[in-house]
Amino acid sequence: MDKTSLKEKKHAYRWMVIPPFIIYLFVLAFPVLLSIILSLSDFNGGRIFGAGSLKLIGFGQYAKLLSDPYFWHAFRNNIYIVLISVFGQLPLGLFLAYLIYRRIVRLGTFWQGVLYVPSVISVIVIGIMWNLIFSPFGPLAEVVNDFNRSSYQNNLEKVLDNYNYQNGDAIEDAMIDDIIRIDSKAARKAFDDPDKGIRETIAVLSDDTDEQLVLDLSNMLSRKWSSDFLNKDGASMWPILFVTLWCWTGMYLIIFLANMQKINKETIESAMIDGAKEKSILRHIIIPELQGSIMNCSVLCISGSLNSFALIYSMTGGGPARITQVLAIYMYEKAFMGSPDYPMANAISMMMVAFSLLLILLTRKIQKAFGGQDDEN
Amino acid sequence: MMKTDFRQERSLGAYIWKIIGYIIMILFSLLAIVPVLWLIVNSFKTTVEFNSNMAGWPKKFFTQNYPGAWRAGDFGILFVNSVVYTVMSVGISGFFSLLAGFGFSKIPGKSAKIIYSIFILGLLLTTQTLMVPIFLQVSQLDGVIGRLLEKVGLCAAEDFHLFYNTRFAVILVYVGSLLPIGIYLCTEYVRSIPTSLVEAARIDGAGYLRIFNLIVIPMSTPILITLGLLNIPTIWNEFALINILVSKTSLQSLPLGIYRFSGTLSSDYGKEFAALVIGLMPMLLFYLIFRKQITNNVGAGAVKG
């Protein structure tokens, strides 16, 4: 090739690669550098890019972070999300894909289409929606309590029929005992002294019709359930983990199903001729064949689970009292709420980058260690 | 015909399996779809009705929540903003990705490998991890450049606004965050275009720009469509970054607006549900229209969490 052509080649290469590279440096590479520098500095607002406005003071922020209980709490929540992603979304997606692939259920495309719907909706909408559903007096509580009440009502009617009770009749002791026995726990919750309480209530309601009496008593005495998971320590992460599972399982179903369809059918056919059971086909053919995509999906899961900012931000905001905070929310709080602590926020940011790189490296290591033969377990 | 799948299986065990399979599928599908339907149904209730009847069907379909929410939340502007952000970022990043993909795969050079692997490294980074440094950088850059320009005597330092609270910065950050996956997919794709085709065109005297226009772009439509289907929902639904890049209502995107709206109007459930439905409809429709193509792409593994 002659010289002008070589020059043209270089020239062309430059204008093809340099513009996107500059944008990339601006949006990803430079912020990483900036973040490292700021996490080691004493920057507290003001100009960054001026002479002498920054002083590097070393790894103090990281040390502070490691002894910060809120950091560890957020970190633990992040780990929960990684775990539910890798050990919840993936097996569930694989299992559902298997049901479709082996035609245990028909209409595969339909199920696939329906189950993917949550993945296309904005996580902000999802977060707000589930927050409404899980709210203490929300629809979930309503449905459960309606059910409790109607089953209580059935039992109550039976008891009243047993005693042939008409409203206004004299009250038998045994009947009161039977009423309490329907749900003694709930009765004790409704009245300090259930026996006395129920007697008095029936006496007060003695002018009502029989139906009205049954309804009022059921309302009063049936079990009340409140779905305020978000206000209970220990249980507060469950709704978030559930929604994480709800959101993305459909995506892994599609990935696994597509990869299952690439598996050579003859392998399965000959295994079936040899009398292989469904369970061993899954265990000894499908899972080993899918090993590569399982590993890739694990990487997706890990990087995706560190992306949980928007979901949690809109669902709980990290609250109540930081219980559902993850690292991204904690970082956001440090940088944008109250008086900003930028060095700390940047230290958290770098910890997150390190954490995800570590997990992804670990996944690759596992993949190498297991080679191509063993299955998921 | 061999018994290769369950359709031909007739034993009792197979029937039990089938029944269990259907029960599981129906349960999970209901779980996926009922909350969304619940949202849509409730957007047709008045707030008063919602408070007394949260889970049931509305007695009368009340449609006034929609115009009310649309006006109160300024969703007209937000919708336009979302369209602009999405179209621009997906378009520009697609163009740059293909350009760079062409450079990396068909013009071999020493630096190509290094720069390419730097881009690939970006696949492991999630931009929202970097929202604090990105915010600082974007919010300070106006001042830095402004002061420089003032020194040169071009304009006053305060008059320079290119980055913070601008559409430009939002699109720039979005383009940057889409580049790693775009460049990865485009480089792999253009690599599969026969090099002899490029060589032949070179011998005929075509410049690289001409080759890009006449050969690479037409042959790469499938990968550009893949990128579009993949990136449009990502950008449309993005929240973490735009939340810190923009503080004016007139620059917000739809998800950002929905979030602010539901925060300020938390007791007016009717309007809130309408707003949420407005928020989920565009991508739900997008999915319903392109369901087949999206499913194929996701299945091919062209996704980033």
Image (cartoon, grey):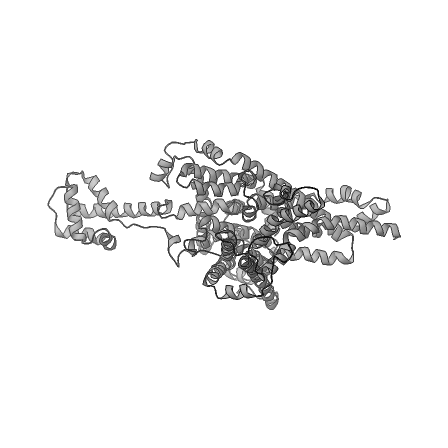
- Viewer-nearest residue: A59 or B105: A59
Q: Is residue B304 visible?
A: no
Is B209 on the left or on the right of B65, as rendered?
right
Is A63 on the left or on the right of A224, as rendered?
right
Q: Is residue B200 visible?
A: yes
Against B109, residue A209 (above or below) is: above
- Viewer-nearest residue: A192 or A97: A192
- Viewer-nearest residue: A66 or A252: A66
- Viewer-nearest residue: A160 or B189: B189
In percent of width and height, residue B204 lies at 86, 44
In percent of width and height, residue A287 lies at 56, 60
Numbered disc total: 0
Is A31 on the left or on the right of B272, as rendered?
right
Q: Which residue in the rendered view is the most extreme toward the left? A: A170
- Tell me the quarter of the picture where residue A369 sits: bottom right
- Tell me the quarter of the picture where residue B288 sits: top right
In percent of width and height, residue A43 lies at 57, 57
Q: Which residue in the rendered view is the most extreme toward the bottom? A: A369
Is B222 on the left or on the right of A282, as rendered?
right
In percent of width and height, residue B95 lies at 69, 44
